[in-house]
């Protein structure tokens, strides 16, 4: 009886993941977009935890996520919003780490990797790697057993040190290429790259093979200013990218109290020129 129920559960999960895959490859007219844009740090953490868990349940164990770097984005000052960028924030990596670390510490216990942990505490520890880079390794220890532990590498950059660190963590913790290693969840959090060009001519191909082709973006929330509007790019697994912009209130477009509206969806992260064109289209209507 127990085996029968287990097979039914696996079949249900397989069907769910198949449907998700179908949504992900849908045409622009049938895009599956995020349900809502979070407007406070707790909402971000809850939404990210759900996305990461859903991907994990469908066998995605190597994941990349991008979280907002500062709670200032939820305030009423435009300068806080402008400064909040995934790459090149004027405060530097040590400053962004101050905001990112507690957010990840809050996120990890909310990711469900086991079903039998009700009432049990999940322990999260942190090891600083290179303090001048603002990088660290957080580990979530699950009371259901080591198989359900999670590791998260915060703010890795394109230096060879991080390539070696990622390989070492995979080898010791979650190398999915070897049958004798468990499929445990490993997150790259707010890495300092966008694509293989970030790694330079000599490191691009290696980075593509070792990281970019293997670590799927399961959650991302990027924010910036375009044409006087606050722009949010939101990616939830396995939705497409949603482009949100603050509603034009007829003024200077800098009122952070104005709600954001979903204006477009994309299968891949749109480039600046695509975002700019979408905003022109909205303004011209």
Image (cartoon, rainbow, N blue to C red):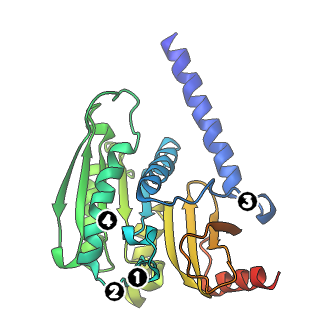
In this figure, which residue is indicated by the disc labeled 3? 31
Q: Which quadrant is the C terminus positioned in?
A: bottom right
Q: Are marks 1 and 4 in contact (CB under 8 Å)?
A: no
Q: Which of marks 3 and 2 is in front?
A: 2
- For image coordinates 27% across by 62% down, the residue present is 101
Q: Do the residues labelled 2 and 4 touch (CB within 8 Å)?
A: no
Q: Where is residue 240 in the image (x, y as percent from the top left)?
A: 64, 62
Q: Reply above or below: 206 against 52.
A: below
> How far is mark 3 from mark 2, CA to CA?
35 Å
The local secondary structure at tag 2 comes to loop
Q: Reply above or below: 150 against 242.
A: above
Q: Are marks 1 and 2 in contact (CB under 8 Å)?
A: yes
* Numbered label attached to residue 83: 1
> How far is mark 1 from mark 3, CA to CA?
31 Å
Q: Quadrant of residue 245?
A: bottom right
Q: Where is residue 160 in the image (x, y as percent from the top left)?
A: 27, 78
> How far is mark 4 from mark 3, CA to CA?
30 Å
> How far is mark 2 from mark 4, CA to CA?
15 Å
Q: Earlier in the sequence, mark 1 or mark 3?
A: 3
Tell how many labels: 4
- For image coordinates 64% across by 47% down, the residue present is 20
Q: Nearer the viewer, residue 151 or 76?
A: 76
* Numbered label attached to residue 90: 2
Q: Earlier in the sequence, mark 1 or mark 2?
A: 1
């Amino acid at each position: 009886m127990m085996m029968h129920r287990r097979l039914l559960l696996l079949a249900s999960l397989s069907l769910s993941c198949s449907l998700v895959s179908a949504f992900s490859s849908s045409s622009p007219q049938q895009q599956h977009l995020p349900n809502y844009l979070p407007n406070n740090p707790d909402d971000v953490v809850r939404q990210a935890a759900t996305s990461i868990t859903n991907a994990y349940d469908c066998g995605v164990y190597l994941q990349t996520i991008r979280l907002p770097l500062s709670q200032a984005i939820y305030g009423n000052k435009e300068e806080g919003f402008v400064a909040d960028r995934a790459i090149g924030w004027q405060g530097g990596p040590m400053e962004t780490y101050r905001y990112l670390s507690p957010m990840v510490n809050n996120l990890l216990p909310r990711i469900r990797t086991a079903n039998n942990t009700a009432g049990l505490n999940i322990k999260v520890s942190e090891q600083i790697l290179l303090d001048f880079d603002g990088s660290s390794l957080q580990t979530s220890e699950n009371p259901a057993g080591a198989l359900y532990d999670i590791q998260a590498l915060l703010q890795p950059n394109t230096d060879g040190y991080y390539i070696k660190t990622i390989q070492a963590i995979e080898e010791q913790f979650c190398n999915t290429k070897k049958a004798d290693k468990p499929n445990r969840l490993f997150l790259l959090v707010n890495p300092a790259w966008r694509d293989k060009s970030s790694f330079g001519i000599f490191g691009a191909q290696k980075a593509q093979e070792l990281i970019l082709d293997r670590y799927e973006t399961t959650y991302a929330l990027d924010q910036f200013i375009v044409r006087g509007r606050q722009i949010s790019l939101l990616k939830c697994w396995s939705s497409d990218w949603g482009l949100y912009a603050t509603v034009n209130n007829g003024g200077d477009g800098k009122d952070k109290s104005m709600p954001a509206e979903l204006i477009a969806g994309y299968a891949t992260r749109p480039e600046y020129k695509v975002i700019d064109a979408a905003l022109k289209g909205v303004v011209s209507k």
